[in-house]
Image (tube, helix red, strand yellow):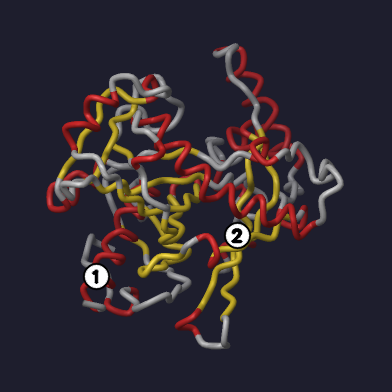
Amino acid sequence: MPNRDPPSWLCLSAKHCDFATMEMTSEVGSSHDFPAFKLLLSCPAGLNPSEVSVVFNQTYDRIPHLDTSLENSITEIWDKRSQQNPSLFNGLKFRYGGQTLTGKDGSCSKANVCLHLGLTDYRTFIGTNLNPLWERFLFPSEDDWRKCQHTSNPLGNGAIVETSDREVVVLQRSTNVGEFPGHFVFPGGHPEPQEVGIISHQSNGGLSCEMINRKVSQEMFDSIIREVVEEIGVPAASLGKPIFIGISQRVLNVRPTAFFFIKCCLPSEEIQKLYRNAQDGYESTQLYTMSRCKLADITSKMPGCHQGGFALYKFMLEAEKENT
């Protein structure tokens, strides 16, 4: 399917979310047979923390594949990568296992989102999603959760950061990073289980399931602020509250990423200066701020999941126009 404008049925009005199945093609991060991304969830009007909940449960953990040799390749690939890079660290991540919509009053116009999350780790991500044989891990199903039941699928996050002079922040990735070196990306990373004291499904510290779910839900929003601060160097106080706008999946490697919209009260010039001292500046080589039109011109040079993030941003902008 060639690149095209988003269909009108996805540009929805106030506080509406939709399970989206739109796919788009691109020459970057895809082959001739792959679209670049798939939108798993689109929330054009945006959701605040009170409208996003989480169910954290081992039900949403990865299911091992029945092919023993394929399962064994996870360890083989990790061992090889570890030998090549001794500093490689196997950290825990939240695993994306789908979502449900829940209406406050039974109507879609008041829909909230409940994310289903399990646990996975970087080792399993390298050995499944980034495995040269990654497609063999996919289960033949139209349902995305079932299709990806054998893959790690850590939930990443990304931010559309809009400056006070209405430009958008974009980074160019370092050539030393593991995925898509040298490509343009939005700031982001991952929500971290350790930040809320999770090291396994059993390590609840005496907290109830309800309390754990609340802490994980809050980490979805706290983590994107943390990533933006660390990657571009702006103070947290300069950032507005994150608004959740949806989930994009890179079709290549079925990599899911949750996207947020964040306003920054600083102008582009000031952000450029602060970037020089960013804590995680080594992950990128350059920070750009650009207009929406210019941003549209470079999205083909982004990984598919970030192209999907831009599509979610466009839907948000169109929803704003409809409501003014």
Amino acid found under the numbered disc labelled 1: Glu
Is the residue marked by circle 2 packed among few (<14), some (14-19), or many (20+) residues within 10 Å? some
SS type, badge 2: helix
Q: Say if residue 40 shows up in the picture.
A: yes
Q: Is residue 140 something that shows in the picture? A: no
The answer to whether 289 appears left or right of 215 in the picture is left
Q: Earlier in the sequence, mark 1 or mark 2?
A: 2
- Of the numbered discs in the image, which one, if any, rests on residue 147? 2
> Can you give x and y, in whole percent of width and height, for residue 91 in the image?
64, 30
Question: Can you say whether 236 is above or below 304 in the image?
Answer: above
Of circles 1 and 2, the one toward us is 1
Inspect the image, locate mark 2, and give the three-letter code of the amino acid beneath it: Lys
Q: Nearer the viewer, residue 107 or 60?
A: 107
**Residue at 49% over, 83% down:** 108
Q: Tell me the SS state at disc 1.
A: helix
Q: Is residue 207 left or right of residue 13?
A: right
Image position, residue 2 (x, y; %): 24, 61
Q: Closer to the camera, 151 or 18?
A: 18
Quadrant position of the C terminus in the picture: bottom left
Reading the image, the residue beneath label 1 is 318
**Residue closer to the observer: 3 or 100:** 100
Residue in the picture at 55% in, 68% down: 113
Circle 1 Cα neighbour tier, 10 Å, few/some/many (<14 / 14–19 / ≥20): some
Residue 112 location in percent, x, y? Answer: 54, 72
